[in-house]
Amino acid sequence: MGSGVPSDGARERGMAELAAPSLYRRPDRLGRDAQRVHGAFRTLNLSFTNPNHEEAALATPEEMQATMIANLPEKTGRSLEEWITEVRSSGLEKHGQVVAMLKEQGVSHGYANLIAHAARERAAGGAGSGADALGAGEPDLVEAQYAGKEDLRPIYNRIASAVRGFGDDVELAPKKAYVSLRRSKQFGLLQPSTKTRLDVGIKLKEAGPTDRLEAAGSWNAMVTHRVRVTSRDEVDDDLIGWLRRAYEEAG
């Protein structure tokens, strides 16, 4: 009998597949599979620091990023630096093309996404850590938004990581007071409105308001709906499902 703790391989597959769009579906299509995924990711994150499954903090994007980078040589045969050199020598610039090239060489999607982001950062003169792939290393505008509202930052990180997983064409564009969620056009926004509440704006077609998915009204004319979030537990399948639906409609 197993111990009930995910193996190293299971943990790393979970991290490498954080960006898999199939994990987040429209609310009306969720079922047992989604519940199993949610449970698996909770167990996955608890097991990073506590194999006895006692309550523990979920791994941050920075921690997941560091673990993936450390595991690159074992899982892909090359270090991050070596992969960045490979990408540079390929002459490819578009993110999707780089990811496809890496996957042709046997690199899983999660790791390919990390390498592609790191190579782009390096080409732009940055550190080349691949931080953007998992929602770490946000621009100073985001840091300023959450100054004095630090308790909301874990909520932002969780939503940002999920949204980045919708596809390679997702863009998180920080503004002065909020972060715009864009595809070919804006489909949502994340705004820390008070010290205890982060408002998620969502642009949905033909979706009536509910007690939770309320009409945006005069709050913000760029979106149609708003969800008020006060804890990480409220970043659930329903919320991610609404955001994914908005992302699909913005394509």
Image (cartoon, helix red, strand yellow):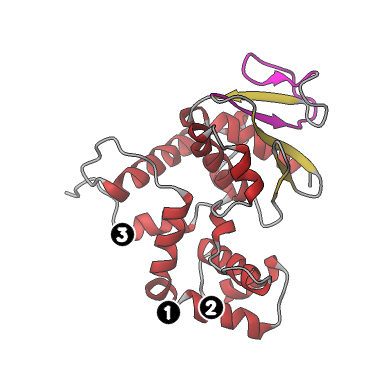
| Residue matched to label 2 | 83
Which residue is most to the top? 211
| Residue matched to label 1 | 77
Q: Is residue 204 magenta?
A: yes
Query: Left of 125 or right of it: where is 133?
Result: left
Percent x, y of residue 246: 72, 37
Residue range corresponding to the magenta coloring: 196-217
Query: Left of 71 or right of it: where is 245?
Result: right
Task: Specify the amino acid type for callout 1.
Answer: Gly
Does dot 3 land on a helix, a strand or a loop? helix
Q: Is residue 98 magenta?
A: no
Circles 2 and 3 in contact, beta carbons < 8 Å: no
Task: Work out how far the residue at label 3 is from the one at label 1, CA to CA, in angstroms.
Answer: 17 Å
Query: Left of 152 or right of it: where is 96?
Result: right
Does dot 1 land on a helix, a strand or a loop? loop
| Residue matched to label 3 | 8
Task: Say which label, 2 or 3, has the lower sequence index.
Answer: 3
Task: Specify the amino acid type for callout 2.
Answer: Trp
Percent x, y of residue 30: 55, 33
